[in-house]
Amino acid sequence: MIQVEHLTRNFEYYTKATGLKGSVKNLFHREKLIKEAVKDVSFCVEKGEIIGLLGPNGAGKTTTLKMLSGILFPSSGSARVDGFIPWERKDEFKRKFSIVMGQKNQLWWDLPACDSFYLNKCIFDISDGEYRRTISELSELLDVKDLLNVQVRRLSLGERMKMEILAALIHRPEILFLDEPTIGLDLISQQKIREFLRSYREEHHTTIILTSHYMKDIEELCPRTVIINHGQVVYDGGLLEMNRVMGDKKRLTIKTSAPIDPSCLAPFGTVCSLNGCQATLEIARNNLTQVSSRLLSLLPVEDFTVTDIPIEESVALFYQNR
Amino acid sequence: MNVKTYFSKLLHRFTRYFRLLFLFAKFSLMAQAEYRLNFFSGVTVECGYLLVKLSYVAVVTMAGVNIGGLSPDEIVIFIGTYILMTGIYMVVYPSFSSLSQKVREGSLDMLIVKPVSLQFMLSFQNIDFSMLIPNAAAGIILIVTGWYQAGLPVTLVSVSGFILFLLSGVFLTYSLFLLPHLLCFWLVSNRGIAEITAAVWDFNNMPQLIYGKWMQRLGTFILPVFIITNFPGLFLLDRLTPFLLFWGLAAPVLFFILCRLVFSRAVKHYTSAGG
């Protein structure tokens, strides 16, 4: 469905020294610099698949989505979305996909959302019956039926985002690009949007690329994750397998009846934290049994917990290491 | 594709765009009506500007002198055309002037992905009626009064020719005055250029015949702003040579083609913003 090969996008920019002197100098001379926002990115997405695109701010996730939706031209590389080259911007292609950006809106600010929906109906040339069915179904699913006639500016952020999603789905796109759709929303709103996306995809088999900084979004929705850092793909796989790639470690937390001597922990693994009677160690998975039994015999252990490395930390390690 | 299918698709496309234009107009008016005070103050301010323009008319008719071979009544037709065209230009002016902001903030993103001409949406998405109403009313009244007072014939040829050159002026206004705003795709902020184009528009507040020969040539062939408000009146007074008749109708087509070419190049320079 989506094939991305060696996609690269450079932006020109220039720096400016602080102060008035820098501004005056800037009027006459600007040193042009190049930023590689996306560097040689390649990946594929199958029809009906949902993938999460992760990466720190400025990693190139949004730029990638903008190229896949034809908003930006790439500097080099190629991409095909359902057989179309996105930046050729063919009308036929535009009817196949939709993009929702958490920080941009398509709804008319001073008018009720239903007016913007109607405009989209006319833009996408949707029949009256199909339009009515879609609005009725999606407004029910998103729980916004009573808000359709309220001016967009009077809606809360969560309500507005639901309306943005509804507006994006009016023409029933086969492909959906979601760029931080839950940004700034409270936990309940985030959860509702996730539930909606999950059930919508299951029913309509929509291909989705989702970017988000909220790990919950990715964990709950995306079996596959592509991590981009400094414009490059640094990981492509399941979130749960990420730990294995990062060294396959486990985290062991012990609570003892007497304060722990730091020197006796050091030989077993990396000490993540030590606070009186409680310590957390990071150890290799294959040493788990051996280390556990030795610690149990060595220390007056009262409580003992083994966990995986939290996904957030694995992802953060990817951000830092690669 | 046979001819019948082609024309039926063309007709469908035309009606779809016409419907969208109607919706943009309706939504713009609805959005403006949300802020009543702003809407009525806009109309009031425009009425003030209109009074200033009408004072020219008063000066011309009271002085009673001929300027550039035109009688005061004939000059009233030119001023009326200028006022009417100003009202029409002001309808799309908010869209034109907000283009630079849209480029700077990256808000074109959500328009590019729609299966409708981007140029069409950018041109007509935010249209303003508060300036059209007083200007169109005053302009039409002045044209009709001047026409009647000057004793010019009301024939099918004169009326349809006048309307044809008005339409030609509308098309030329669109292309000619959108072009400078397109520079924002390269320069991002183009307020200075926008102010210069506004000043160029005001060259039309008097008939072109008051300017020198070279100025008239410049304003007719190089930067053809004079065609917009002068050619309907000059046609009526039978002052257009066959070449000028041709040029008056060809210039809007040429400038529209130029505008389309520049627009498609400009959009490739769009770098979006905010993420």
Image: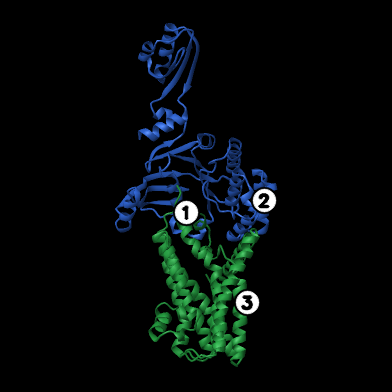
Chain colours: A blue, B green
Q: Kindly identify which residue carries mark 3.
A: B137
Task: Give the residue number, with chain letter if any, for mark 1.
Answer: B105
Mark 1 and mark 3 residues within 8 Å of each other at the beta carbon: no
The front one of A48 and B183 is B183
| Disc nearest the viewer among 1 and 3 | 3
Which one is nearer the viewer's eye here, A203 or B124? Answer: B124
In this picture, residue A262 sits left or right of residue A130: left
The amino acid beneath tag 2 is: Leu
Instruction: Classify 10 Å Cα crowding around label 1: few (below 14), some (14-19), many (20 and above).
Output: some
> What residue is shown with label 2?
A148
Mark 1 vs mark 3: which is more N-terminal?
A: 1
Q: Which mark is residue A54?
A: none
3 and 2 marks on the same chain: no
Residue B211 picture location, percent across and down: 43, 84
Labels 1 and 2 touching (C-beta < 8 A): no
In the rendered image, residue B3, in percent from the top left (x then y), is placed at: 54, 74
Spatial CA distance of label 1 from label 3 is: 37 Å
Q: Residues within 10 Å of mark 3 (few under 14, many from 20)?
A: some
Please state, as top left, top right, bottom left or bottom right, where the C terminus of chain A lies in the image: top left
Kind of residue sitting beneath label 3: Ala
- Secondary structure beneath label 2: loop
- The CA distance from mark 1 to mark 2 is 27 Å
Q: Nearer the viewer, mark 1 or mark 2?
A: 1
